[in-house]
């Protein structure tokens, strides 16, 4: 099974890159205008009785806004040159997504099954959720193909189930900033999900399914 022809979640289109460059240029132009022609700050001095004693004008210090706007323009340029979209999901105030979930998954599955660092957690009386969007790639294994998903395509309940049942002997991530990829075996069935965070064991979340008394066995 081959991967989708166009990676929907990663590459910026040419039009988006051009638009990004235009935005960066406009932001930098505004920064120059602010620096060359800083806004005038009007200071009015009042007496205790409320009478106006005098009005003075002075140039506003443009150093801070100029620096902020310039840095913003550079960030936009770097973003455009990188060519990758930002993630559309966040947790604990941090937005994140692995830049190449497929590459990270391939590297992980190249290791023999016994050498992979992974642990399984079980969620009873619940069916395995379906992905909210199409996979970006597939990884072939002896027992079948595994669909690879970036963070934005993983059901929120899967992330919640993984974090809620996180093994005590594995360091739990504070947020989603180190998310690498998630995989699920293709085909019909109550297949488990595997989620991987950088620097940690992969966590396989198996589901017992409705009406069952126990969890299914992970397919890895």
Image (tube, helix red, strand yellow):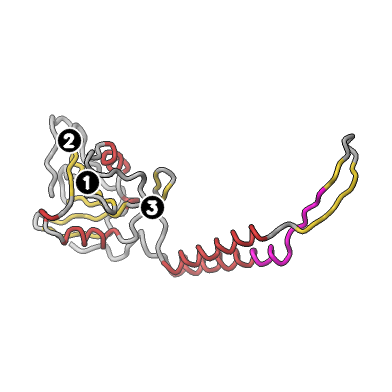
Q: Tell me where the magenta segment starts and ends, as one range.
A: 30-43
Q: Are marks 3 and 2 in contact (CB under 8 Å)?
A: no
Instruction: Estimate the spatial distance between the alpha carbons at disc 3 and disc 2, rounded to whole Å.
Output: 30 Å
Q: Which mark is residue 203?
A: 1
For the point 25% across and 50% down, which residue is it? 200
- The percent coordinates of residue 179 (x first, y second) are 32, 52
Return the residue at label 2. Answer: 209
Residue beneath label 3, please? Answer: 96
Circle nearer the N terminus (1, 3): 3
Work out whether 35 lies above or below 130: below
Disc 2 and disc 1: Cα gap in Å?
Answer: 18 Å
Disc 2 versus disc 1: nearer the observer = 1
- Closest to the observer, 99 or 118: 118
Residue 168, given in percent of the width and then of the height, sits at 23, 38
Which quadrant holds residue 7?
Answer: bottom left
Q: Where 162 falls versus 67 (above or below)?
A: above
Disc 1 is placed on an element classified as strand
Q: Is residue 70 left or right of residue 110?
A: right
Query: Can residue 34 be found in the magenta stretch?
Result: yes
Measured as percent of width and height from the top left, residue 86 is found at 42, 57
**Secondary structure at numbered mark 3:** loop
**Image point (37%, 51%), residue name:** 177
């Amino acid at each position: 099974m081959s991967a989708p022809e166009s990676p929907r979640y990663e590459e910026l289109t040419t039009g988006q890159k051009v638009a990004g460059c235009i935005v960066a240029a406009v932001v930098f132009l505004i920064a120059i205008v602010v620096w060359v022609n800083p806004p005038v700050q009007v200071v009015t001095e009042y007496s205790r009785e409320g009478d106006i004693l005098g009005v003075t004008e002075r140039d506003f210090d443009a150093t801070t806004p100029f620096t902020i706007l310039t840095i913003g323009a550079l960030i936009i340029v770097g973003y455009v040159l990188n060519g990758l979209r930002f993630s559309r999901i966040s947790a604990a105030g941090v937005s994140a997504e692995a830049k190449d979930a497929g590459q990270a998954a391939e590297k992980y599955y190249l290791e023999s099954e016994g050498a992979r660092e992974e642990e399984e957690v079980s969620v009873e009386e619940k069916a395995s959720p379906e992905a909210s969007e199409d996979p970006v790639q597939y990884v072939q294994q002896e027992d079948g193909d595994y669909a690879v998903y970036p963070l934005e395509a993983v059901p929120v309940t899967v992330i919640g189930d993984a974090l809620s049942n996180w093994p005590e002997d594995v360091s739990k991530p504070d947020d989603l900033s180190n998310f690498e990829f998630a995989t699920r075996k293709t085909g019909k069935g109550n297949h488990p999900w595997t989620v991987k965070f950088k620097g940690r064991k992969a966590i396989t979340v198996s589901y017992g399914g409705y009406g069952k008394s126990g969890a299914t066995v992970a397919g890895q």
